[in-house]
Amino acid sequence: MTHLLPRSTPELQSVPAAAISRLISALDGIDQLHTLTVVRHGHVIAEATWAPYQRELPTAMYSVSKSFTSIAVGLAVSEGLLAVDDRVVDLIPEFAPEHPSEHLRALRVRHLLTMTTGHSEEPPLWEGDWVRAALAADLPYEPGTHWLYNTPATHVLSQIVQVRTGQRLLDYLRPRLFDPLGFRDPLWQQSPAGVDAGGFGLFIRPEELAAFGQLLLDGGVWRGRRLVPAEWIDQATSKQVANEPGDRDWNQGYGFQFWRCRHGAYRGDGAFGQYVVVLPEHDAVVAITGGLPDMQQPLDAIWEFLLPAFDLPAPAPAPAAAVDLPTPVPAVGGELRPQSVAYEYDGVIRSLRVAEGVVEIDGRQLRCVPDSWSIGEFPEDPSVDRFWYGDQVAISGGWKGETFTADVRLLQDASTFRLVLDGSGHLRVTRDVGFDGTEVWEGDPAQSDVVAHHSAVSP
């Protein structure tokens, strides 16, 4: 992959390499970090990738997508296509109810950006026209008076940009942001109505995420070319509204689709550990991807191990110290068996066939051996409720006694699926992170006569 940012050693950018090693060691102890990129003074000084994950693959950004939507709105504002104090019903009247409420008539772009729409709960998503559903939902609070994290509100911003520019978010941002930054084929999932999701659904690579952070840090300038107005970035990343009280990094205020952090920092933030953290006081950016059950942990590690290390005097003389490599994610142990077994299910997995060195899931064959990760493809199947994005997976597994266990790691998404098949044909599938927490599916073979017969699967 062509580097978007120049490389340097930590010491040359006034960060002791030992501090980077301590940071990586701390992140090693957090379950499910995928990648880390640390940038100082515009140079990448540390990259860590927890195998089997790969930096070359675009990965789901979840709600970091919201920050890109904010930039699209800012560009549309700079082009005179809309203003932050425009009323939503004036910008997209065809999507509003026939008789909008007083609060809906008062709803402005600013309220969508700051998540102060007046909703008491998030409007429904996933079915039908998401924008019409969001605008039809009750607004018990006057816009601007009540903060509520609100992904449908961001989707309404996407619809506004699409209506006002005549282009979906992805196409509008491509020549203005993605191409100049050097992004390679970014993807953005769409609603059933053909509108980029806005609040989620963007797929980019880890270094592209870091480059976005550097653009923000530099006030919208990339390699001497202004891409985004500095005024917009300043507004978007400043505290516009207070959010929930507390002392965590989720309680420091909210901007225009950006979160404020402790220590004068701000971030784009996506579910399960997608981060671009910008530290203006230290001229630094930290980008992280992961599948985390506890999203505060990596931020705490940054504050504890990296923040105090900026501009510490280097040891004399200052050799290029080695930086510890991350510990690979352990593969699933067990043993290979010469027999083949096949089971048919009616659930999250319709069929599972296990042969020596091969697993076949719903007709897709994947090499699978114990104590090693095998990389394969498993296209998304919208007819099955797996809820995973991208088609690249890593799989490892084997037999222990009468039980077969395999882990399927989604290399372009946050989750890991564990398949446990016992000798009676009972299948248990767990997903480690999801919006409903750890999820479990269990099933017995759909027909008793298909249990444990020899299959046609071949290694």
Image (spheres, rainbow, N blue to C red):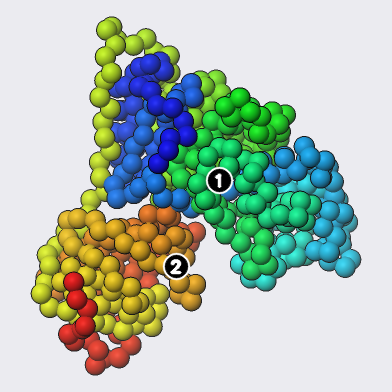
Q: Which residue is mark 2?
A: 380
Kindly report the distance in space between the C-alpha atoms of the residues bearing marks 1 and 2.
22 Å
Q: Residue at x 45, y 50 (%)?
A: 58
Name the residue nearer the viewer: 429 or 230.
230
Q: Where does the image place residue 147, in percent across and percent down from the top left?
A: 69, 46
The residue carrying pointer 2 sits among few (fewer than 14), some (14 to 19) or many (20 or more) residues within 10 Å by Cα, namely some
The residue carrying pointer 1 sits among few (fewer than 14), some (14 to 19) or many (20 or more) residues within 10 Å by Cα, namely many
Is tag 1's residue or tag 2's residue first in the polypeptide sequence? 1
Asked whether residue 428 appears in the rendered view, the answer is no
Q: Where does the image place residue 277, in percent across and percent down from the top left?
A: 51, 34
Which numbered disc covers residue 64? 1
Name the residue nearer the viewer: 432 or 147.
432
Residue type at the position of mark 2: Glu
Which numbered disc covers residue 177? none
As helix, strand or loop, the secondary structure at mark 2 comes to loop
Q: Residue at x 63, y 36 (%)?
A: 253
Instruction: State left or right for residue 11 relative to residue 367.
Output: right
Instruction: State left or right for residue 372 relative to residue 323.
Output: left
Q: Residue at x 71, y 54 (%)?
A: 167
Q: Is residue 305 above or below residue 434?
A: above
